Image (cartoon, helix red, strand yellow):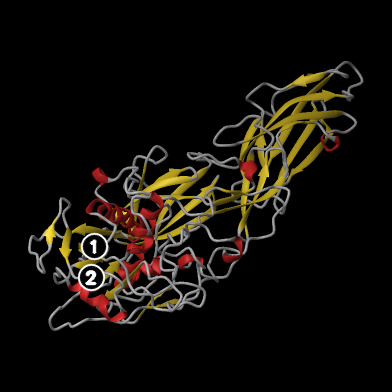
Amino acid sequence: MDYEKIKLTFTKVHVYRDADDDGSGNWYFIAKVDGLPVGDHNQIFNAEEGRSIPLPEGQWETTINVRGRELNSNPVIVRFQVKDSDFISDEDLGTTERRLFMDMRQGYFDTRTDRNRYFRVHYKVELMVMGQFGFHPPDAVFATRQHFGSLSCTTVSGTSFMARMEICPILPIPADASLPPRPRIADHLRARNIIRHDGIEVTPNDPINVISNPSAIPILDPADANANTAARIEFTYYHPRTLHFTDDDPRLEWSIDPIQPSVPAGGLVRGDARFLGPGSTPDGRNSRGTRVLVYGTAEGEIRLEMRFQGTLFATYRALVLPVRQIRYRANILNGPGSSQPRSRPGHVRDHIAIANRFLRQMAIELVPDNDATVSNGARPTEFPGIFRIIVSRGVTREIPLGGWTRAIKLNYREGVLNIAYVHSARPTRRGRSGPLGAADSWLANGAGDRIRDTGKPSTSWIRPSGIPPDGDPVEQVMILLDAREEDPARFPRLFGMYITNQSGDPDFPGNQLTYGSTIAHELGHVLNLNHREAGGLDGLNNPPNQNIMHPDEGADLAQDFDIIQTRAVHQSRLVQP
C-alpha cells in the first residue's frame, strides 16, 4: 500500500493589482512543486483587480511521494510565479515560495508567504492516509519514522507524537521492571496493555493454541491449519492508546522474514511460514491487525515483522518446528483404604490435555502409548494409555525420597514416558507439605550439558534484548540437567515422573490447571530443563516467575516456555524424531 504522499492543488489566484494601465491584465502562471512544473503556463487568464481567478480543476495539482524523506532537512518547496503577458515584453509580477516541512498539515492555505502586492495564491493540501487522499480526522497519522525504539508519528493536523508497540514473548507479561527499557514518551498519552499480566485459566477443552506468542510455530499441512491449530501472535502493549488499533487494523501490516539461524553450524536453518485468516493475503505472505495466525511450512527460524503504515514497528522471533510426539503411560497406583490417588482416569485424561496446551508452545505433544503390553498387574481403563495398578500402601502413600523410582518403574516400557499417579510423597523438608510431583528418571540431552542461543530479539527478552532502545543481544547459555538414570541395565531408557494428591480435588477446575501445569513442569525436567528464576539453576534470569520451569510449578503465573528451552527439548532422547 502507498504511504506518505501529498497532493497539492492550486485552487485560485486573487488579484490585488492587475499591473496594467489600460483595462485588466493578461496573466499566466509558472508553478513548480518540488522542482517539477505544475499546470499549463501557456494558458492566459483575465486578471481583474479585486477578483479571483479560479484554476481549472484537475489541471493545477500534483502528487509528491515523501516516503522515507526527512522533510525537516529536505522540505517540499512550492513556488508560484505570476507574469503579465504584453506585446513588447512580459512583466514579472513576482514569485511566492513556501516550504513544507514534517509538520505539514491538510487544509486550504493562503498565508503571508503566499502573497505579494499583486496577487495571493490559494491552494489546498491533501495527505494520503491508507491509500486515500482527502481531508481526514485530525488525529489520523500521515507519516511515521523510526526513532530509537519507538516511532515518530505525524498527524494530518501537523502534530507529532512518539508511539511504541511490543509483542512480548512471555505470557503472562512480567512487570515493566523485568522488560526491556522503553524510550521516554509523553505521559499524558496513555499506553494500553492489551494482554493482562495474570495467567489464563487453561481448560482441557480450550483450543490447542490457546496460549498466544509461543516460542515454536508448528509446521502444519495447509488443510489442517485453522484458527484452532495455528500459532496465535498478538500485540501485548502499545502507546498511545489514541491510536485505537483493532484486531484487523489495515494500518498494521505483518510479513515473514526467514532469518539466519542463531545457533552454530549444524543447527537450525532458515525457516518459513504462512499467515492465514481474514486479514491475510492469498499467498499467506502478509497479514494485518493486532493479532495474526501463522503456521509453519519449513523448519528453522523466522522473524515476524510488523509495520505501521509502512514503517517497522515491532518484531517477533520464533522457531518453526514439526509437532513432535511423546508417548506416555499414566498409571494410577491404588493402595489399600485411604491410600489411593484422588484422580480417576477421566481426570488424568484432562490433566494431559491441559499439559498439552502448555507444551504446544514448544511444538511438543503427549500422546497415549498404543502398545497393549502391560506388566505389574496393570489394568487398562476406558482411556488409551491410562492404567490402574493395585499396590501396597508404601508404594503410593508418603513415598520416601528413595521410593520415587519404584513407582515410576511399574508398567514400564522403554522410551515411553511413565507418569505414576500416587497418593502422596513424604515432605523433603520438615514443616513443608509434600510436593505436587517430581521427575525421577531421564537420559542426557543430545545437546550436552548446555545449549546456546544468540538470536534477536533474545530468548525471553533477556537483557540486552535487542528491542530498541536496549542493546544488541549477547549469547545466552542455558545449563541443562545431567542424566538421571535408574537401573539402566534392567530399565533402559526409563523416563518417569510421579503426580500426587497435593494439587487438591481434581473435580475443581482450578486444581485441574495445577495438575496439568505440574505435568508440563515435570516433563520439562525429564526433557533436561532446569529451574528458571532469578539466579536459577539454568543460568538465566528472566522471566522472574512466568516460566513453567519456575520452582513453584503450581503458580498461576508460570505458563511460558521460551525459545532456548524449545531448542533443548527437541534434542531430548525422549522426543520422537
The C terminus is located in which quarter? bottom left
Front residue (pair 382, 495)? 382
Residue 527 in view (yes/no):
no
Front residue (pair 411, 9)? 411
Type of the residue with mark 2: Arg
Residue identifier under label 1:
337
Q: Position of residue 175 (x, y in %)?
A: 58, 61
Q: Quadrant of the rendered structure where residue 135 is?
A: top right
Front residue (pair 81, 87)? 81
Q: Is residue 252 left or right of residue 443?
A: right
Q: Position of residue 543 (x, y in %)?
A: 50, 67
Label 2 crowding class (10 Å Cα cut-off): few <14, some 14-19, many 20+?
Answer: some
Q: Position of residue 125 (x, y in %)?
A: 69, 33
Q: Residue furthest top?
A: 23
Q: Disc 2, disc 1: CB below 8 Å? A: yes
Check residue 438 in the rendering and tell me which mark sits there, or answer none: none
Q: How many discs mark residues in the rendered view?
A: 2
Image height check: is 409 above or below 512?
A: below
Q: Is residue 130 left or right of residue 187?
A: left
* Spatial separation of the CA atoms under disc 2 and disc 1: 9 Å
Q: Position of residue 147 (x, y in %)?
A: 63, 58
Q: Secondary structure at mark 2?
A: helix
Image height check: is 166 above or below 448?
A: above
Image height check: is 465 above or below 230?
A: below
What residue sits 32% from the left and 75% below the top?
A: 528
> Which one is earlier in the sequence, the residue at label 2 or at label 1?
1
Q: Secondary structure at mark 1?
A: loop
Check residue 393 in the rendering and tell me which mark sits there, or answer none: 2
What residue sits 59% from the left and 37% below the top?
A: 129
Residue 568 in view (yes/no):
yes
Label 1 crowding class (10 Å Cα cut-off): few <14, some 14-19, many 20+?
Answer: few
